[in-house]
Amino acid sequence: MIDHPLVEFIVRNPGLAETLIGEHVDDGQGYCRACALDAQRGYHSYPCSVRRMAELAHRVEQSSALPDRHEVAERADRRSSI
Ligand SMILES: [Zn+2]
């Protein structure tokens, strides 16, 4: 169940959720360390929206029962050889 385009984007890019979760961390003062780099617009309190999206995407990845690509490719091969 994906209800946000950014979450869907993260899910479609394997490893991106982990990368974002690793970068968007609490700086120890309640702010996101990664988003604070772009501080002209003010600090983003932690968890920032990117972090929340990444965590949501990570949960979607964990819960999704998508067949792995190898299996899909094998099925496609069999179909084309008939
Ligand atoms: Zn952030």
Image (cartoon, rainbow, N blue to C red):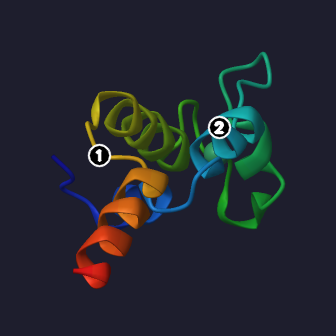
What residue is drawn where x is 58% and y is 52%?
14
Specify the quadrant that holds the C terminus: bottom left
Q: Seen in the image, is 54 located left or right of residue 62? A: right
Q: Residues within 10 Å of mark 1 (few under 14, many from 20)?
A: few
User: From the viewer's perspective, is 73 left or right of 65?
Assistant: right
Mark 2, other Cα within 10 Å: few <14 / some 14–19 / many ≥20: some
Whether disc 2's CB lies below 8 Å from ligand 1 is answered: no
- Residue 49 on image: x %, y %: 47, 47
The label on residue 29 is none
Q: Residue 37 at x, y = what percent? A: 84, 54
- Which quadrant of the view contains residue 19? top right
State the image coordinates of residue 17 (x, y, percent, origin top left): 57, 44
**Disc 1 residue type (three-letter):** Leu
- Where does the image place residue 52, in percent across and percent down from the top left? 44, 38
Give above or below for 38 relative to 49: below
Q: In the rendered image of this protein, does residue 58 appear above or below residue 39?
A: above
Q: Residue at x 55, y 60 (%)?
A: 13
Q: Which residue carries the number 2 mark?
A: 18
Circles 1, 2 touching at the beta carbon (< 8 Å): no
Q: Nearer the viewer, residue 26 or 17?
A: 17
Foreground pick, 25 / 8: 8
Secondary element type, mark 2: helix
**What secondary structure is marked by label 1?**
loop
Ligand 1, by image quadrant, is: top right
Task: Look at label 2 and name its amino acid.
Answer: Glu
User: Residue drawn at (30%, 62%), measured in percent from left and top?
Assistant: 75
- Going from the N terminus, do you reach mark 1 or mark 2 first? 2
Query: Which residue position is annotated with label 1?
Result: 66
